[in-house]
Image (cartoon, grey):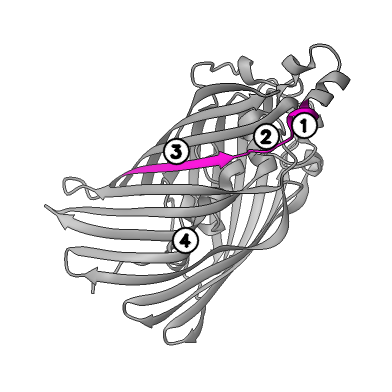
Amino acid sequence: MNRPILPALLTTLALSSPAFGIEVTENAQIHGFLNQAYLYSPDNPYAGTDADDGSLKFREVGVNGFVELSPEFRLAGQVLSRRQDEADDGDVRVDFLLADYLIFSDQDTTLGIRAGRVKNNIGFYNAIRDIPSARPGYNVPESIYFEAFRDTLLSVDGANLYGSALFGGSQLSWEVAGGERKVDSEEFEQFAFGGRISNRESEDIPLWLLHVNLVPAFERDLRIALSLVDLEVDLDGIRSLQEAQAALIAAPPGDILANPQAYITDAEFDALFAIFSVQYSFDDWVITAEYLNLDSEFEADILGQPTSDSVTTEGYYLQLEWLATLETSWFTRYEELYLDKDNRSGNSIGRPNNRYRGYGKGWTLGGKWQFAPSWSLIGQASFNEGTAWLPVYEGRENEDLQKYWNYYVLSLNFQF
């Protein structure tokens, strides 16, 4: 039976390391991982101020498993605790929890459906970004996989229809997903608007996804993928018109121009992500490139008066990996991100303490050493200009952020 390997996380764990999981029964396994990192960010606070002098408050602990009830039907899930200094407090969350049913399969075609909290295939790395051993370095490319949308885009509470087909020697796989997911209001508002516009903690938003992956017959070492994601964040009822008017009366003259988000009564944000991905492998080398185009529309009532705007965000990276030996690999990556591609300096969306939030450019160098079957060590250095992908946390708005900033990571990973 030509069945795709369904949980992407379990697939990667199985293929990326000779470490073995716990076999509960003949048809059920449990896997897990622990990642502890030391991160030093001397120029800008990375996910919190502790990293200014170096911090160990960066760790991930995950347990996942699956049970195959029949050749066509599986259950799979993962729980994760993720600590990122002040940006993520380590609370346990359900990354995915799904039922997977293979509707049809023959030599050339498969069709199946997943339901529950389902992992999203977006680009090459979204579905495996929560697996330390599967990432090319300590983190995935930040120009494409925004930290502010991490949990929102990682999975969706809904359904996923997937399939694959062989034609003319080429292999095509696809999936369509839809449902709802929570978005962290603080992280989203800081990323999208440069500051808080509400006091909400989270919002349930609708999310739709299309992902297509092609391995062409003329070059089996080439992968080409297209991902489309549509989401809508509705922030109606942020504050009453009377509250906004009272705040304006109490504010200093000109505050509405300097701080317009304080007077928004209702808002809506619509976004369409399009990611084009290419990867080519030859000998011991892997070249990966991805391009992001994000069209967003923002509508708001400011003191009862409607206003709207649209912005196109652009990001891309080029990454080269060298698989030097079975135990060691090295990589380098260059990436750029522009929150408004028509204003690459970012002047129009800068904030008083964060004048460079509109863009990011960066080089990353790193390596991985698997020194035992279940253990690996990752080192990474990143050299950045602009703060577009600097993680958001409560209190960052009070920090005076620098244009040029670097950070350095040493990460120890155990998995079974």
Which residue is labeled 2 in the image?
190
The outermost residue toward the front is 242
Q: Tag 1 or tag 2, which sits nearer the N-term?
A: 2
The outermost residue toward the left is 168
Q: Residue 397 — which label? A: 1
The answer for how far apart the CA atoms under marks 3 and 4 are is 28 Å
Q: Tag 3 or tag 2, which sits nearer the N-term?
A: 2
> Relative to 301, is 64 above or below?
below
Which residues lie in the magenta part?
225-244
Image coordinates of residue 89 in percent, x first then y, are 74, 54
Q: Tag 4 or tag 3, which sits nearer the N-term?
A: 4
Task: Report the mark closest to the observer, 3 or 1.
Answer: 1
The answer for how far apart the CA atoms under marks 4 and 2 are is 27 Å
Q: Is residue 149 left or right of residue 246?
A: left
The outermost residue toward the bottom is 25
Q: Is residue 97 visible?
A: yes
Q: Amino acid at mark 4?
A: Val
Mark 4 lies on a secondary structure that is strand
Which residue is labeled 4 in the image?
118
Task: Report the mark closest to the observer, 2 or 3.
Answer: 2
